[in-house]
Amino acid sequence: MGKKPGGQERHPGTTLVPKENPDSIVKHEAQQCSCGCDLNEVSGAILQERQVADLLEVRIEYTGHQITEKNTALSPQKFSCSSRNDIEDTVT
């Protein structure tokens, strides 16, 4: 049997709170009254405010890891560092 919907026992729970200054504001205004008069130039009062929190971008960041090989003028031997064990030969 699964968990009940809603907050779980002994879990404090959290909720998103509105931002004081949202990133953008979309005004939803009446364009015309019921008699057909144009309301576009008429000022109004804010009746209600709501906010929506959107996760706009989830993107993958690729980091290239290059292992170099070096040698000096004094030694023909080539030197390289070892690669990290957690980096595979393929994209992970």
Image (cartoon, rainbow, N blue to C red):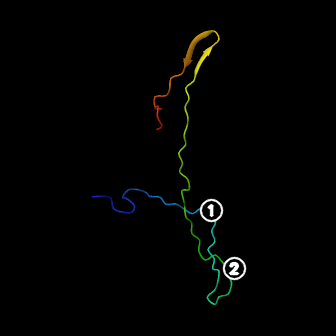
Q: Nearer the viewer, residue 43 or 78?
A: 78
Rate crowding at label 1 as few (under 14), some (14 to 19) or many (20 or more) other CA atoms within 10 Å: few
Task: Determine the residue positioned at 63% across, 86% down.
Answer: 33
Q: Quadrant of residue 24?
A: bottom right
Any mark on residue 60, and which? Answer: none
Measured as percent of width and height from the top left, residue 92 is found at: 46, 38
Decide: is 33 above or below 52. below
Rate crowding at label 2 as few (under 14), some (14 to 19) or many (20 or more) other CA atoms within 10 Å: few
Measured as percent of width and height from the top left, residue 69 is found at: 57, 20
Q: Nearer the viewer, residue 41 or 67?
A: 67
Q: Is residue 20 left or right of residue 55?
A: right
Looking at the image, the residue that sits furthest to the top is 74
What amino acid is found at the position of numbered circle 2 in the picture? Asn
Q: Which residue is mark 1?
A: 22
Looking at the image, the residue that sits furthest to the bottom is 35
Measured as percent of width and height from the top left, residue 27 is found at: 63, 71
Task: Determine the residue positioned at 49% across, 60% down.
Answer: 15
What amino acid is found at the position of numbered circle 1 in the picture? Pro
Q: CA distance from mark 1 to mark 2?
A: 24 Å
On-image quarter of the N terminus: bottom left
Q: Is residue 20 left or right of residue 1?
A: right
Asked if the residue under mark 2 is in contact with the one under mark 1, i.e. CB atoms within 8 Å, the reply is no
Give SS at disc 2.
Answer: loop
Decide: is 24 above or below 76. below
Any mark on residue 40, and which? Answer: 2
